[in-house]
Amino acid sequence: MKHLGKNEIQTLARQYGMKPDRSQGQNFVIDETVITDMVRAAGIVPGARVLEIGPGFGSLTIALLEAGATVVAVEQDRRLIPALHKLTSVYPPLHLVTGDIFQVRRALPLLIQDGTYQLVSNLPYNITSRVLREFLETQPRPTSVTVLVQQEVAERVIAPAGAMSVLSVAVQLYADSEIVRLVPPSSFWPAPAVTSAILHLTKIGSDVHGFLKTLKPYSAADFFRLVKIGYSGRRKQLHNTLAAGLKLSNQEVQKTLLSAKISPESRPQTLTIRDWIRVVHAFMKKQ
């Protein structure tokens, strides 16, 4: 497999007059084992269709193409486009899209359809949470996600009840998640200040745990409205934040929580997804 190491990437950066922008989370992978482990974790096979966000100079892109995938690569930094265009002449299965992923996503169904592709990326740290939520909650959804993210974010995603956040609730509602391995700062150029992790999400859209089925007749929007209200006061007891957010009396909120078999004194991070579903049913019935 072809590989772009630190020397090759630095040479390309000089050639194209490109200095990595830390504000955009531009940390290029220089460790071949990390690339190999991402492709292996994603289970890329010949004929796979992959969306890659922020391909940089194409280290991961080349590995995906060499594994036989068709790759739709979305890059917003125009300084990198000439180098990526050269890759398209070598690898016809590479489709390059220029622009912000959140702005061009509306056009992606022309290249990828819901449930027909995998998302594999070294994600810029500053957009990680938004990418995970948008691509899990709205179409076109991938069948799996394999991304390189900050260790802290990966640990938030897989967190169990007692340490959950809005992000972990949002991801675990739609997918199973695991950390494949940790990745040290030395695996990047320039080296970030934090350790990273390969995060792998599977069973997207299958509702394998029956969460969405149990949530009916209420919607994911109803679910997240209450979750966000609950987490608006992470250190506060749930009855206080829900009473303030829903503009209900504290007595009524406590009674409703007890009807859902939830202690009013609970903190939001202690609730499981099934707990939150019971909260939604209990409060939506009152509206």
Image: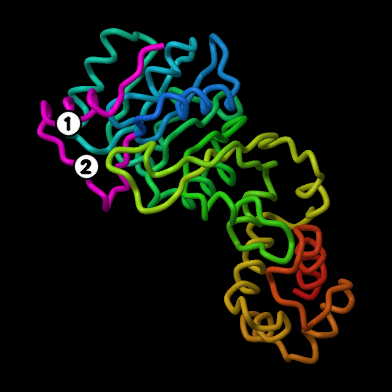
Identity of the residue drawn at 57% across and 13% down: 45
The image position of residue 249, as x and y in percent, is: 73, 91
Q: Mark 2 points at which residue?
A: 20
Q: Which amino acid does label 2 sit on?
A: Pro
The image position of residue 213, as x and y in percent, is: 81, 47
Identity of the residue drawn at 52% across and 53% down: 153
Q: Does the magenta stretch include residue 18?
A: yes
Q: Mark 1 points at which residue?
A: 13
Q: Compared to 143, does 85 lie above or below?
A: above
Q: Earlier in the sequence, mark 1 or mark 2?
A: 1
Q: Compared to 41, does 85 lie above or below?
A: above
Whether residue 105 sits left or right of residue 230 in the image: it is left
Mark 1 in CB contact with mark 2 (< 8 angstroms): yes
Disc 1 versus disc 2: distance between alpha carbons?
8 Å
The quarter of the picture where the N terminus appears is: top left
Q: Nearer the viewer, residue 5 or 17?
A: 5
Q: Is residue 21 magenta?
A: yes
Q: What element carries label 2?
A: loop
The image position of residue 211, as x and y in percent, is: 78, 49
Q: Compared to 287, does 194 lie above or below?
A: above
Q: Magenta part of the protein: which range?
A: 1-28
Identity of the residue drawn at 68% across and 80% down: 242
Whether residue 81 sits left or right of residue 111 in the image: it is left
Identity of the residue drawn at 61% across and 28% down: 115
Q: Residues within 10 Å of mark 1 (few under 14, many from 20)?
A: some
Q: Which of 253 and 125 is in front in this view?
A: 125
Q: Which amino acid does label 1 sit on?
A: Ala
Q: Compared to 258, does 111 lie above or below?
A: above
